Amino acid sequence: MLPAVQISLQAPFRRLRPLSLHALALGIAALPVSHAAFAQDVSRPVDTGPIEGAPAAPPTPTDETQPVAFEADDVQYQQNSEVVTATGNVVLRRRDEKGQVQSVRADTVNWDRKTGKIVANGNVRMVDQDGNQLYTGQVELTDELKTGMMENLLLVMREGGRLAALKGQRIANGDVILDRAAYTGCDVTDDDGCPKKPTWRIVAKKVIYSEEQQRVRFTDARIELFGAVQLPLFGLTVSTDGKAVSGFLMPDIKSSPSNGLEIAQSYFWKIAENRDLTGTLSVFTGAAPMATAQYRQLTDIGAFQITGYATSSSKIPIAGGQDVTIAGERAFRGYIYANGKFQLDDNWSVTASIRRATDRTFLRRYDISRDDRLRSMVELERIDQDSYFSLAGYATQTMVSDRTQGQIPVALPVLDYRRRIDDPVLGGKFELRLNTLGISRSSGQDTQRAFAYGQWELRKLTGMGQEVTLTGLVRGDIYHSDQNELTTTDLYRGLSGWQGRAVATAAVDVKWPLIGQVFGGTQVLTPRFQLVATPKTRNIDIPDEDSRAVDLDTGNLFALNRFPGYDRIEDGVRFTYGLDWQFERSRWRIKTTVGQSVRLATGSQNVLPDGTGLSNKTSDIVGRTEVRYRDFLNFIHRFRVDKDSLAVRRNEFDAVIGNTSSYLELGYTKLNRDISQDIEDLQDREELRAAGRIAFARYWSLFGSAVINMTDRSEDPENGSNGFQPLRTRFGAAYEDDCMQLALTWRRDYETLGDVKKGDSFQLSFTLKNIGNH
């Protein structure tokens, strides 16, 4: 083999306008689906390893020289014609202006020094600076190793996509035209390395690439699925830089008992690099059309999006609603959802969200959301290493049929400030906090609250390994409320006018981890003891807005205040004891917690209703156990046992069995609190949940889920169930391989709510992978 030769291409010549292999390759990589090739086989095997025998890369080109290094078995130079001919495993390398290397391998290379034309023949393989590879029988090159004329070509993109064409040529305006081209984003080999036919391919009689616009356009294109089904494609365009481009998206097809058959077609408009707009028109056989628009924008300090739905249809007012529309009369209906966050500087940020619907059944009828409330908010935050500040406001729209909107609170303003300070004497931590809250209702009680507290905490390890935590807290509250009589539950109402209280709490918490070997693994046994003392506190006189759903469990067993909010304080003197146990061995992990609380001195315990597990001197027993075996099994069980009758007041488990391909999820919850019907936040419930997926035949799967209300009338007389009431069931079949997803889903709803009819719904979803943005 001859040594590598560097030739400076300085002779005057007529250059072809260069076509960047990188740009073309990325553009094709962003292409959508594919179809049967006309002349080239996109799945034919090729060598994608490094080019052997490549010479060292030459220097970076300058305005005067375009150096190209090459190596070949034989090189001949004809002085009269000034033609250089290299034969036998020819390899050319060149650096571009950015210092990146391009390579060409061929059986024969002819270089005409007069014209600057380079022709590579036989098993041509080109590798650009980004690893995209071109295979062809013959190609014309410029001195910059950019393509001109090509025949029988195959592009293999670094990202995995492939484009084959019969030939390619550049026209007068600089565009490149590929004739009879085919593209696929699928793998062309299986897991064993054997060739396989791609699931989908796109074929087109003509593909036009515009270097100036950085676009690839397909003309007379079709998509082929599974080598048989062919569908036409219209106006298919992708970008060569991998970015989004304006165009139509894949349509969605659904069917529901409320709206009939639905076909939704979306158009994506890329307004600018940081802005886009997606418009959707949904056509129904059983309802008027609906228009949807989503605008998104990225700014220098944040991002936001605005989504809106609009239609005109008839609706049926539901109980508790305030709809003025006569049942069955057509009216404007819609929904708006907007959110965004802006980082003003390193510490300050603003977050906002708006969610509003014209009525309570719109979202459910059009299968947009099943949320039972829509929350709008705005929040100004400042966060640094030792402090936190928040000024916020919240408004909620209820979607529940039996709730009155006038009873739903608006929280404004909500101010919270916290600061941590190191204790210079004992080495603990101080936390100072200020909080204000204003709640107003159009048809209910209004409450304003402000409090300030300081908390000191010190953690120490003893010589025997115990972890001891000492805590001290002082707090002062001031409340004002009016229209208290509009709150129907006496326990939550409080006294109208101005009220105040002072709170002081002291606590000591001791943990003693004990580590040892057992059953071939390692166990950690941690006994825990806590003593908390709080003087008798005014509770009933204070309105309760945020502490209503109190229920003893392992999450709040060792909390200083077992109420979930700030309006109620658990006073008196109590000690809590419990045990944490953790066991680990190869592939297994078990964690369990169990505990109970005992009151030594009672405070105002009438704020803890019977059935919460905390109302008596001795609390109920609570526990939680988690068992995990590798990633195949995860089982969690939570319970609360009545300390007198040993009746199970809470019995809840969640289990996941299987892997990512086939799995079964089971969930069961039974709340048997035996609580008064007046406490609406803590009613008894029983529910069964199941979901699963079974994979078979390599790419196929069956999936389903169900939610069943098992509450009977003896547990809740106002509940519609009488022991077994399916709420929602879903079942479907799906096909998924490396480049396509296809699924058909059936769902049944069992309850009619206003104009949302019960019955069967169907959805067909179709997704093509490795197709880029379009």
Image (cartoon, grey):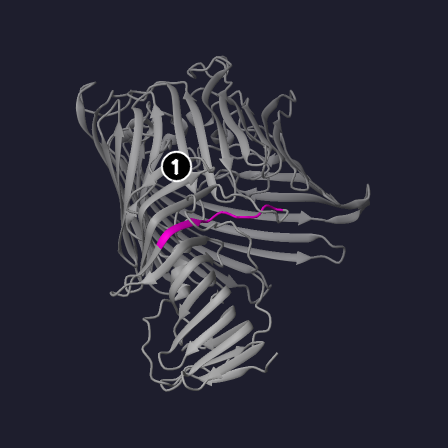
Where, by quadrant of the figure, is residue 73 drawn? bottom right
Q: Position of residue 84 (x, y in %)?
A: 46, 80
Q: Nearer the viewer, residue 586 or 557?
A: 586
- Left or right, 401 with reference to 527: left
Secondary structure beneath label 1: strand
Q: Dot 1: within a 10 Å radius of its alpha carbon, few (fewer than 14), some, or many (20 or more) residues?
A: some
Q: How many numbered discs sit on the rendered protein?
A: 1
Q: Nearer the viewer, residue 256 or 163?
A: 163
Is residue 186 on the magenta stretch? yes
Residue range corresponding to the magenta coloring: 179-191
* Screen quadrant of the N terminus: bottom right
- Left or right, 152 with reference to 555: left
**Res 520 seen here:** yes
Q: Is residue 455 above or below residue 587?
A: below
- Amino acid type of the residue tagged 1 in the rendering: Gln
Q: Is residue 700 above or below residue 173?
A: above
Q: Position of residue 338 (x, y in %)?
A: 29, 45
Q: Position of residue 328 (x, y in %)?
A: 20, 18
Q: Nearer the viewer, residue 717 or 340?
A: 340
Is residue 74 on the magenta stretch? no
Residue at 58%, 47% (x, y): give it. Answer: 195
Q: Nearer the viewer, residue 125 or 210?
A: 125
- Left or right, 327 with reference to 651: left
**Res 413 seen here:** no
Say which residue label 1 marks: 230
Where, by quadrant of the figure, is residue 461 drawn? bottom right
Q: Is residue 219 above or below residue 26?
A: above
Q: Position of residue 261 (x, y in %)?
A: 31, 25
